[in-house]
Image (cartoon, rainbow, N blue to C red):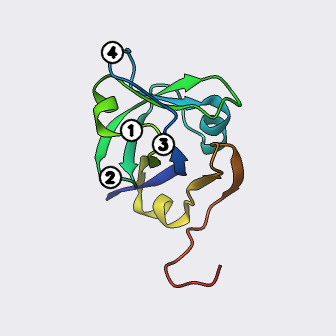
Amino acid sequence: MLITTLKAKIHRARVTGIHPDYEGSCAIDQTLLDAAGLLEFEQVHLYNVSNGERLVTYAIVAPAGSGTISLNGAAAHKAAAGDLMIIAAYAVLTEAEARRFRPTLVYVDAENHMVRVGSEIKRAGAPA
């Protein structure tokens, strides 16, 4: 059996730009892509924490250290500059692989600069 599991996420990144007429879909700071282990053109799921919109698109590279999270083309209609997003990617693994696998979780500050990288999700109700 194959299991689709979370590969990586960039948690609560702030949208820095909206470009509906630009080719490409979601430009992400190269530093964040590298930290999460995401590749240019890899499929990503975008979850808009600010308005509840969800979409599937692909990542493109923005300059390293820029803090850029830009939604382009059709994706630009699903968010506004300043919205908080969770950017997630998934992997298909065997059940045995999925039981051993731990995702890469990248946490950012208000300017989309990396604060920490981990592999454990904070559980609701757990102490900070």
On the image, the x and y values in percent for residue 17 come to 47, 29
On the image, the x and y values in percent for residue 60 come to 49, 24
Upstream in sequence: badge 1 or badge 2? 2
Q: Badge 3: few (under 14), some or many (20 or more) residues near its Cα, within 10 Å?
A: some
Q: Residue at x 45, y 25 (%)?
A: 41
Q: Amino acid at mark 4?
A: Asp
Q: CA distance from mark 3 to mark 1?
A: 6 Å
Q: Which mark is residue 80?
A: 1
Q: Residue at x 62, y 54 (%)?
A: 107
In this view of the protein, which residue sits in the foreground, 119 or 3?
Answer: 119
In this view of the protein, which residue sits in the foreground, 24 or 100?
Answer: 24
Upstream in sequence: badge 3 or badge 4? 4
In this view of the protein, which residue sits in the foreground, 55 or 80?
Answer: 80
**Residue indicated by mark 4:** 21
Q: Badge 1: few (under 14), some or many (20 or more) residues near its Cα, within 10 Å?
A: some
Q: Quadrant of the N terminus?
A: bottom left
Using the image, determine if residue 114 lies above or below residue 34.
below
Q: Can you tell which quarter of the image residue 57 is in?
A: top left
Secondary structure beneath label 3: loop
Q: In screen coordinates, is 119 left or right of 123?
A: right
Q: Quadrant of the C terminus?
A: bottom right
Q: Are marks 4 and 1 in contact (CB under 8 Å)?
A: no
Q: In screen coordinates, is 46 left or right of 105?
A: left
Upstream in sequence: badge 3 or badge 2? 2
Q: CA distance from mark 4 to mark 1?
A: 15 Å
**Residue indicated by mark 3:** 82
Q: Are marks 1 and 2 in contact (CB under 8 Å)?
A: yes
Using the image, determine if residue 70 lies above or below residue 99.
above
